[in-house]
Image: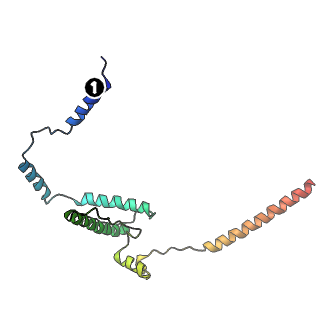
């Protein structure tokens, strides 16, 4: 039995379309609307989990974009607060634009300071140093001294190699 490609395509399209047909009788519009309204007003619905998951995903993407390193729980809490604030502001701006029949509004995004608290950001903008508890002290140790010592040893080794090369050249003559 030979099946044409067009017949097979029609069969596949019909099968795919059947996936979108409801398997039970269609409810009336009023019944469907009230069912959706009841589900939306349910008090025990946990909406924090998906939102936190979205905030965590946004935090991970933001850390990668700005090369912020590993996950930091304190920084994440500041980020999540800023993320929530900007998300709400964007939703409000979109709603106002839609109601006023305006074109799409530019959306706000988090910049490299997205994990700063308000106090840290204000201090950064004014040039003040943040409180000692807000900063991590990173010691460079004696890096410069070690680098100078390594350069001196390298210079001595280069001199010794040059002397050895010169001595070899004399022996070969």
**Is residue 161 rendered to the left or right of residue 15?**
right
Is residue 70 visible in the rendered image? The answer is no
Q: Nearer the viewer, residue 153 or 165?
A: 165
Quarter of the image where the C terminus is located: bottom right
Q: Is residue 138 above or below residue 37?
A: below
Q: Nearer the viewer, residue 63 or 3?
A: 3
Q: Nearer the viewer, residue 67 or 150?
A: 67
Number of numbered discs: 1
Where does label 1 land, which residue?
Answer: 7
**Is residue 158 rendered to the left or right of residue 45?**
right
Residue furthest right as drawn: 173
Q: Residue at x 38, y 76 (%)?
A: 121
x and y percentages locating residue 119 in the rendered image: 36, 78
Q: Quadrant of residue 71?
A: bottom left
Q: Is residue 131 above or below residue 76?
A: below
Q: Residue at x 72, y 66 (%)?
A: 154
Q: Estimate how packed mark 1 is, as few (under 14), some (14 to 19) or many (20 or more) residues with alpha carbons within 10 Å.
A: few
Q: Quadrant of residue 45?
A: bottom left
Quarter of the image where the N terminus is located: top left
Secondary structure beneath dot 1 equals helix
Q: Quadrant of residue 4?
A: top left
x and y percentages locating residue 168 in the rendered image: 87, 56
**Is residue 120 rendered to the left or right of residue 168?**
left
Is residue 150 visible in the rendered image? The answer is yes
x and y percentages locating residue 125 in the rendered image: 41, 79
Q: How is the image coloured?
A: rainbow
x and y percentages locating residue 32 in the rendered image: 9, 49
Q: Nearer the viewer, residue 118 or 153?
A: 118
Q: Residue at x 29, y 30 (%)?
A: 9
């Amino acid at each position: 039995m030979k099946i044409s490609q067009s017949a097979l395509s029609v069969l596949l399209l019909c099968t795919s379309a059947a996936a979108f047909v409801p398997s039970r009788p269609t409810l009336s519009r009023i019944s469907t609307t009230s069912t959706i309204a009841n589900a939306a007003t349910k008090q025990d619905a946990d909406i924090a989990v998906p939102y936190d998951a979205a905030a965590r995903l946004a935090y991970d993407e933001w850390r990668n974009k700005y090369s912020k390193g590993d996950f930091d729980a304190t920084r994440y809490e500041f980020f999540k607060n800023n993320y929530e604030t900007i998300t709400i502001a964007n939703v409000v701006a979109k709603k106002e634009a839609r109601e006023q029949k305006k074109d799409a509004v530019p959306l706000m995004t988090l910049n490299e300071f997205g994990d700063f608290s308000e106090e840290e950001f204000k201090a950064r903008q004014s040039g003040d140093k943040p409180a000692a508890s807000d900063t991590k002290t990173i010691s460079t140790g004696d890096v410069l001294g070690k680098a100078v010592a390594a350069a001196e040893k390298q210079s001595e080794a280069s001199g010794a190699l040059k002397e050895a090369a010169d001595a070899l050249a004399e022996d070969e003559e």
